[in-house]
Amino acid sequence: MEEIELFLEEAKELMQKAVDHTASELVKIRAGKAMPNLLDGVMVMYYGTPTPLQQVSSVTTPDARTLTIKPFERSLISDIEKAIINSDLGLAPQNNGEIIILTIPALTEERRLQLVKNAKSECETGKISIRSVRKDTNESIRKLQKEGASEDAIKKAEIQVQKFTDSYSLKIDELFAKKEADIMKV
């Protein structure tokens, strides 16, 4: 029974990680609003080392459609611009010698639908991860039956794993609904 509890705890943990990862991926899908975490994946060459943008500058949002980036060292402006241009964000940086300004364009209806499709794809990937955890956990629990665990305990554990699967899948559905509403809001 103790081993079954360990498998259940591990399953719960792994499913939560799948939900957390999905949430972090959804944050990267921009909804037409300027958010500093939009630049999370941008790496700047800092003395020959790829460094996250947030470690070499401060990123602020003066309004809903603008991001400003103020490098800690003025000499980094051109490197930051290159990093933004080379990223897959599709943003055109403008600089005034001290700060870099990014204007987030309004989304077209077609682009919004594409972003919703991307969000749905990310959520489906998260659900696949959860189902994979369910499958692995159930296999591990069934192996315990061969080692002498009771059939009732195995059945109860499998029911519990299914409850976890359903609850974490629902969390991903909620994340998607929230992101879809955010993207489609004009």
Image (cartoon, grey):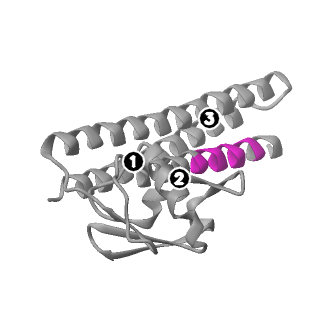
Instruction: Write down the quadrant of residue 72 in the picture.
Output: bottom right
Binning the other alpha carbons within 10 Å of mark 1 as few (below 14), some (14 to 19) or many (20 upward) gives some
Instruction: Please state which amino acid type lies under the numbered disc 3.
Output: Val
Q: Which residue is mark 2?
A: 42
Q: Are marks 2 and 1 in contact (CB under 8 Å)?
A: yes
Along the line of sight, which residue is nearer the eye, 149 or 83? 83
Q: Which residue is mark 1?
A: 89
Q: Which mark is residue 133?
A: 3
Number of numbered discs: 3
Q: Which mark is residue 23?
A: none
Asked whether the residues under the numbered discs 3 and 1 touch, taking CB atoms below 8 Å apart as contact, a structural biologist would say no
Which residue occupies 42% across, 42% down?
A: 88
SS at badge 3: helix
Residue 55 vs residue 37: left or right?
right
Check if residue 10 falls in the magenta segment.
yes
Q: CA distance from mark 3 to mark 2?
A: 31 Å
Q: Earlier in the sequence, mark 3 or mark 1?
A: 1
Q: Which tag, 2 or 1, sits closer to the chain's start? A: 2
Spatial separation of the CA atoms under disc 3 and disc 1: 32 Å
Q: Magenta residues, as a range?
A: 6-17
Q: Is residue 60 magenta?
A: no
